[in-house]
Amino acid sequence: AWQGRGLGPRLMAHVIADARRQGVQLLFGEVLTENRRMLGLMREFGMRLQAHPDGAQLVRATLALGAAG
């Protein structure tokens, strides 16, 4: 019932903002290859998508946040 209501982008924006405040320089996540909606969301936030070292069923998404401040 919550799909398509914009909750994912809001949560991701919050996670990224909080990570920056905490001084995190690199944020990463692992997404199932079949989860096209999540992969699209990661792209919208400028995350780099690459093959996962554990196999083709996963994609690694990374976002360089840089230095805090």
Image (cartoon, rainbow, N blue to C red):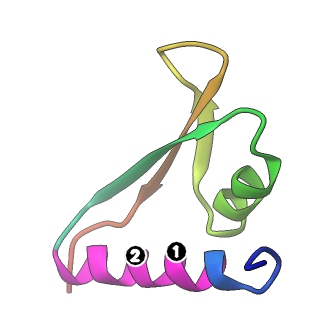
Residues in magenta, as a range? 9-22
Answer whether labels 1 and 2 touch (C-beta < 8 Å): yes
Q: In this orientation, which residue lies closer to the viewer: 32 or 23?
A: 32
- The amino acid type of the residue labelled 1 equals Met
Q: Residue at point 57% right, 13% down? A: 55
Residue 13, magenta (yes or no): yes
Q: Quadrant of the C terminus?
A: bottom left
Residue 7 location, quadrant: bottom right
SS of the residue at dot 2? Answer: helix
The residue pinned by badge 2 equals 15
- The amino acid type of the residue labelled 2 equals Val
Q: In this orientation, which residue lies closer to the viewer: 25 or 33?
A: 33
How far across and how far down the image is residue 52, in percent?
53, 23
Q: Residue at point 73% right, 85% down? A: 6
Q: Quadrant of the N terminus?
A: bottom right
Q: Residue at point 59% right, 47% down? A: 48
Q: In this orientation, which residue lies closer to the viewer: 68 or 59?
A: 59
How far across and how far down the image is residue 16, in percent?
41, 75
Q: Callout 2: 10 Å neighbours few (<14), some, many (20+)?
A: few
Left or right for 48, reference 66: right
Residue 27 location, quadrant: bottom left
How far across and how far down the image is residue 26, in percent?
32, 55
Left or right for 25, reference 53: left
The residue pinned by badge 1 equals 12
Residue 61 location, quadrant: top right
Classified by dominant secondary structure, the portion drawn in magenta counts as helix
Q: Name the residue furthest front.
A: 1
